[in-house]
Amino acid sequence: MGEAELSLAAVRDALVREEDSIVFALIERARRPRNAPAYAAAAAAGGRSLAEFFVREAEVLHAKAGQYQKPEDVPFFPQDLPSPLFPTKDYPKVLHSFASSVSVNDAIWKMYFNELLPLFTVDGDDGNYAETVALDFACLKALSRRIHIGKYVAEVKFKDASQDYSPLIRAKDTKALMNLLTFKAVEEKVKRRVEKKARIFGQNVTLEDNADKQEGNAGDSECKVNPEVLSKLYDLWVMPLTKDVEVDSISVQASLNIN
Amino acid sequence: MGEAELSLAAVRDALVREEDSIVFALIERARRPRNAPAYAAAAAAGGRSLAEFFVREAEVLHAKAGQYQKPEDVPFFPQDLPSPLFPTKDYPKVLHSFASSVSVNDAIWKMYFNELLPLFTVDGDDGNYAETVALDFACLKALSRRIHIGKYVAEVKFKDASQDYSPLIRAKDTKALMNLLTFKAVEEKVKRRVEKKARIFGQNVTLEDNADKQEGNAGDSECKVNPEVLSKLYDLWVMPLTKDVEVDSISVQASLNIN
């Protein structure tokens, strides 16, 4: 995101577009069954799983190519990432550089593998482990980016009402901060929208003029990912983790202003 | 694909599902403008572009993870790919091992960068080069897989009617072979279906009950990728290249039978 874009409307547009990426990534991962061996400790990688091996190595490659320069692009394994080999463009700095340090990727990692994956993949093992972990990486990247766009949300909300936030930050009242950052009506709308996206993007499109299907009203069992999983994902994890990012970012921002 | 799956119906199902992946990948790439610097020769990579550097390195990583064991997974840079570091599952061999050698990836590469990319990305440079080439790699992979599933199509068609194919193969009559492999009515249907998929998957989904939008009838200008680009992509490149794969595969198969 660039300087000119830092309005609540622009940030919301970015969040809405990211929903499509998350739904696409989950639909693609759902082509393959669970494929548990991809997540088991492997001697070849010093006890790491294929999934961890792949994400670590993919992040090294993406870093060489110039990724992870923006606050919303947060690596899962930031230790010892190489510098870009190729010239990168400087982004207008809209967030304090300290914002880069805010990361909830450990929580995203655990949530994805322990909670989410069993909800939208079927039991089974078809042997396509390499493809599977590449699809996992795409899901993790989309989720992480959506959640870390919270850094911009925080910046916009804080600028709009610093007088409301500052006392709570000074008192380290995380619960009150969280309440102030929560807009129930908006959250309900987001949940219904991602559910609808899963219904529309996950349908089997045929040339028959089946009005039901076109309206995305096909039985949810026919969808490639159960639309309710998307609603649950946002309710239980994406929106709470985004707010964790917001609280962390606002606290960082405020402590810098105070000192 | 496995042994039990090698029927024309199963192969067609695989092709239909792959359409979704191609449409998703193009929609994702279209988030970013052309970003021409990603395709320019770069000193850092010995004169290679960032795009080529990225695809080469990504293929090395995917190979280590166990990719490229199946006939439809064909690398763009097969030279010196490492062996898998992780245990892989043996796939039931439904195609002669010589089928692995059939590849039209050079043509796919040229088509994608020279012809297709300018059709569905807007002019411009937003600096997100690393993200851009990662999205290109996803497009290339999906297109290559779709086209190389032609190896199975060839096997099924040849088994069903080897008496029709064999004389043409012996005469090396590529044009007549191509005609025999062409089913105009099916191709028209495929073109209309991918266009419809682009319209449905590329719409901006909102909670308003806009019947037009739900039916995927929103103006094409509102779609993230112009649906006509998908129809053209299949007409001019995907279906012809798939048939090139079919002709090559059938010729290989037949020459082995004859000798």
Image (cartoon, coloured by chain):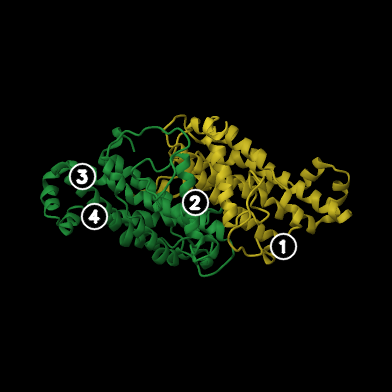
Chain colours: A green, B yellow
Q: Contact, CB < 8 Å: mark 4 with mark 3?
A: no
- The dot on residue A253 is 3
Residue labelled with disc 1:
B93
CA separation, marks 4 and 3?
27 Å
CA separation, marks 4 and 1?
55 Å
> Type of residue at label 2?
Glu
Q: Residues within 10 Å of mark 3 (few under 14, many from 20)?
A: many
Q: Could you tell me residue B176's position as x and y percent?
A: 81, 43
Q: Could you tell me residue B142's position as x and y percent?
A: 58, 48
Chain for disc number 3 = A
Q: Contact, CB < 8 Å: mark 1 with mark 3?
A: no
Residue labelled with disc 4:
A185
Specify the quadrant that holds the N terminus of chain B: bottom right
User: Viewed as shown, does residue B117 lie left or right of B131?
Assistant: right
Q: Residues within 10 Å of mark 2 (few under 14, many from 20)?
A: some
Q: Contact, CB < 8 Å: mark 2 with mark 3?
A: no
Residue labelled with disc 2:
A57
CA separation, marks 1 and 3?
59 Å
User: Which residue is located at x 32 percent, y 60 percent?
Assistant: A237
Q: Could you tell me residue B156's position as x and y percent?
A: 74, 57
Q: Mark 3 falls on what kind of element?
A: helix
